Each structure stands twice: as structure tokens, then as C-alpha cells.
Image: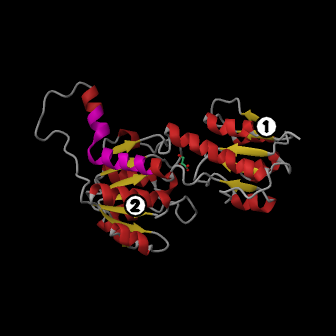
Amino acid sequence: MQQHIFITRRIPEPGIRALEGKGYNVTVSGKDGVLTKEELIVALKGKSYDAVLCLLTDKIDDAVFEAAGAQCKIFANYAVGFDNINLDAAKQRGMTVTNTPGVLTNTVAEHTFALILAAAHRIAEADAYTRAGNYKGWAPMLLLGSDVSGKTLGVVGLGRIGSRVAHHAAKGFGMKVLYYDPKPNAEFEKEYGARYVDLPTLLKESDFISIHVPLLPATKYLIGTNEFAMMKKTAYLVNTSRGPIVDEQALVRALKEGMIKGAALDVYENEPSLAPGLADLPNAVLTPHIASATEETRGKMAELAALNIIEALEGRVPPNKL
Ligand code: DGY
């Protein structure tokens, strides 16, 4: 019997080709945008899909699982992060949930480093200045930034992406690396000369602080007013993980009041909205949740999400089962 897959929004072709190549009937949501939870429920109810390929912008809770029905075996998230999915509800219903780790590690680490360099060298500000016709000639004090080489990077969360950012920092820029994680990693310390510290020490000693933890109840607002108060006045905060890990209003105050020197963000507390005042700050570099957005990586994410579905529908344990 032919199996039916629902994809909540158009994804890169390699994923769709992989599913169609298996002979599945693939339906992609016709809406040009994020489905609300109500729209998602309507899209799934009574349709007997065998699998759903969903995105980090879809809020998947028990009502959505119920709408998908007992025939549905898997929700394959097209993202490494899965804070948009209620895993407890999935477990209760015996629903398999998967994510797409690994394939985006390099790309997100590159974007993180692009943000570090952009913040330190004031790239966004300088670009806007030049385009506005303000460049009237070389000047000794024009748009002075900060060096990155030889400084200290504090990595909060030493998973795949945090480790790769540390690699670029240590090997590419001769940076000292501090890291904070639930457990130390002796091999990593040896390879990169890194030092395992608690969060307050990392905040006090780092010149650049880069966040790489998942969003969990324990990591929500991990960085707020108290943490900004511990940072150097010359420090930069970079976040490419999930927005709510940083108290964004506290960040705006810290940037305005000079508690830290700058920030570079790819993720926001209430996406796609920004905290009031954030967009007006010249010492903030802002990108729209695109850290994994290269042609190559988004294609691989689509393929991996499709592979997880194929494995589940063929009765095997998908490689990225959560
Ligand atoms: C993820 O995969 O979780 C990223 O945020 C998507 O870019």
C-alpha cells in the first residue's frame, strides 16, 4: 500500500526526491509560510499520513500528534534543535521523533565565526556607513574594532557545534579556549589547550562568549542581567543556538549601558520579533536564523530528515531517533 508523507513547508529538493524515490506520495503544505498550530491540525486530521516532516517553526504538541492519528509513525524534524516538539507527549503515544544532527555542524560553526568576526570588526556598521555615502577618506580613528586573534573564547556547551567553533578559534586564530559543559572532556582539552571552568569563571574571563547549549527548562535565560554584570566591559556575546537562552531585554540594556561591548545573534527570544531597541543598536550584529542556511547543508538536512522517515517506515530504527 502506498505511504503518504506530509511536509509542513517546502524544503530543498533532495529530501523530496528521496521520499518520492521510495514511491511515497508526498504532500507539501501549500501555504507560503509557517502553519499555525490550528492549521497544522486541520492539515493532518483524518488524512492518515504515515509520516510528517516538520520544521523548527512548527509547534508540535499532543494535539498535533492526536490529529496525525495512530497511522502516523514518525515526526522528522528538519533541524538539530527540537525544543519545538513535546517529546514527553511523543513518548506517551509511541511516536518516533528525529532530528538532523551532524550535517550542519560545520556550517553553523562557520556562521558563528562569521558573527564573531563581524562583531569585532564592526562589519555590518561599516557596510551601512559605506553604502550611506559617509566614507570621505581613510582616517586613523575610523570605526575602530577589536582583534580576535589571541583573545579568549568562552564556549558555553561543548557539543558538536561548540567543539567545532573552539577548533576554529584555537587552530585558526590562536585563541585561548575556556568551556563550560555538564562534563569535562580531557581529549578536547589536550587537543585545543582548553580549560574547563564554571559559568561565572567563563563569563568573567572570556573576550568572546559563544552559546551552544540546547533550549531546555534549565537553559532558559541562562544569560541575563546577573551574567552580563560578570562579563568584561569589552566582551562580545554570540548566540547561534536558541534565542530564549538569552534574556533579550537584559541584553538590550547591557548593550545600551556598555556592560558589554557587543553582541552577534542569529536567534531571538520571540522569533521573528526582536526585543524593543535591539535593531537600533549599532553594537549588535543580527542575522535571521540562517546559521545552517547554505545550499549544501540545507540539502543534507532535507536528505537526513527523509532518511529518518524512510528508515522508520521500513521498520528500522531511524539513525537520529531522539
Ligand atoms: C537547527 O537545526 O536547530 C538550526 O537552528 C536550524 O538552522
Answer few, some or many: residues within 10 Å of disc 1's Cα (few below 14, many 20 plus, some between 14 and 19): few
Residue 211 located left or right of residue 201: right
Quarter of the picture containing the C terminus is bottom right
Quarter of the picture containing the N terminus is top right
The amino acid type found where label 2 is placed reads Thr
Residue to which mark 1 is pinned: 23
Residue 240, visible in the rendered structure: no
Name which residue lies at 20% across and 40% down: 143
Image coords of residue 84 (percent x, y): 63, 51
Answer few, some or many: residues within 10 Å of disc 2's Cα (few below 14, many 20 plus, some between 14 and 19): some
Residues in magenta, as a range: 109-127
Residue 164 numbered mark, or none: none
Magenta stretch, main secondary structure, is helix
Q: Would you identify the image quadrant in which residue 32 lies?
A: top right
Mark 1 near ligand 1 (CB under 8 Å)?
no
Image coords of residue 172 (percent x, y): 30, 55
Residue to which mark 2 is pinned: 225
Assess whether residue 208 is covered by the magenta stretch: no
